[in-house]
Amino acid sequence: MALTLKEQLSSPGGILKFLVKYNTVFIFILLVIFSALISDVFFTSANITNLLKQVSGIGIISIGMLIVILTGGIDLSVGSLVALLAVTFAILVNLVVLPLAILLTIVIGFSLGSISGYLVAYQKMAPFVATLALMTIARGLGFIYSKGSPVTFKTAGGVFMSDFANNSTLGVPNIAIVFFLIVIAAMVMLRYNVFGRLIIAIGSNEEASRLSGIKVNKYKFLVYAISGALAATAAIIVASRTNLGSPNMGMSWELDAIAAVVIGGASLNGGRGTAINTLMGVLILGLISNILNLLNVPSYPQQVVKGAIIIFAVLLQRFESK
């Protein structure tokens, strides 16, 4: 029988357990308060807009990473896929009409993700190995197709996408709206849709799911394909922001996506994690970078801070499970 909030807090160690359970929310709130105290410009519209724009691309691939991790897998290819697909979109937007360029880029992303899905689900290859291989291939193809140089938008469709990506609606950046809509879709899918419930079940106990008649291979295949499609969406966004597709885009984004999912409380063993917590994880990483930038801290120490926070998040998970 589930305890009420009052009963949880009044039980022995209840307050501490409550803080640990909702640590992602409390960390986010504390970071917002700290940011406001150390900088007068933190709550300015320009800074908030810039923060939302910076996290949107990584946020989208983090949702894809979440659904893969929920099955007990991992996708190391997403950062390189962003680079390859950004170059692909820049080439396509200069050749065909905009809607077709967007559609083809997403289809290509889905297809590339399907390669990892096939290797993991049907060839029983370790997710780390399969996606590491695709990561290397995708980055190399990005440099080959772009000839090592950024591909700029040269058509009206490219100009439209650039305007869309750099403008706002009702004060919210358009690309952040796209990110939030994807988060909402993921929330609904994981909570109310059969597909979402099944991938969580597979991550919780794959063998039991298989014995229950669930087509485990099919769903494991699909989560990697969806991750590829979301990488394509992120690629379209980041390419549109800068008006070009570069093979250098998405460097280490796969690590940031994993970090966001873990900070959000998802288990790398699968079966546990939510879209809203992943959103919080993405915002926490964005806030950390924003704070350190406001304090003029160089980029290298920022990596140290991110790593320490990942360790802290994992230790909190172990404490919560006791």
Image: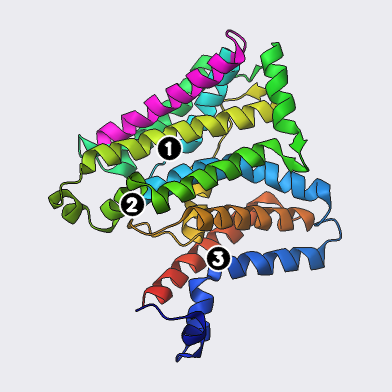
Q: What range is drawn magenta here? A: 93-119
Q: Position of residue 290 (x, y in %)?
A: 72, 53
Horizontal side of 112 relative to 295 (left or right) equals left
| Residue at point 44%, 22% (across, down) | 108
On the image, numbered disc 2 is attached to which residue? 197
Label number found at residue 295:
none
Instruction: Check the image and report above or below for 321 versus 186.
Output: below
The C terminus is located in which quarter? bottom left
Q: Secondary structure under badge 2?
A: helix
N-terminal of the two: label 2 or label 3? 3
Label 1 crowd bin: few (<14), some (14–19), many (20+), radius 10 Å? many
Identify which residue is drawn at 47% across, 46% down. Answer: 186
Task: Work out whether residue 181 or residue 38 is closer to the camera in this orientation and state it.
Answer: 181
**Hey, which quadrant is residue 91 in on the image?**
top right
Marks 2,3: beta carbons within 8 A: no
Q: CA distance from mark 3 to mark 1?
A: 23 Å
Q: In the drawing, what numbered circle is on residue 227?
A: 1
Amino acid at circle 2: Arg
Dot 3 corresponds to which residue? Answer: 24
Quarter of the N terminus within the rendering: bottom left
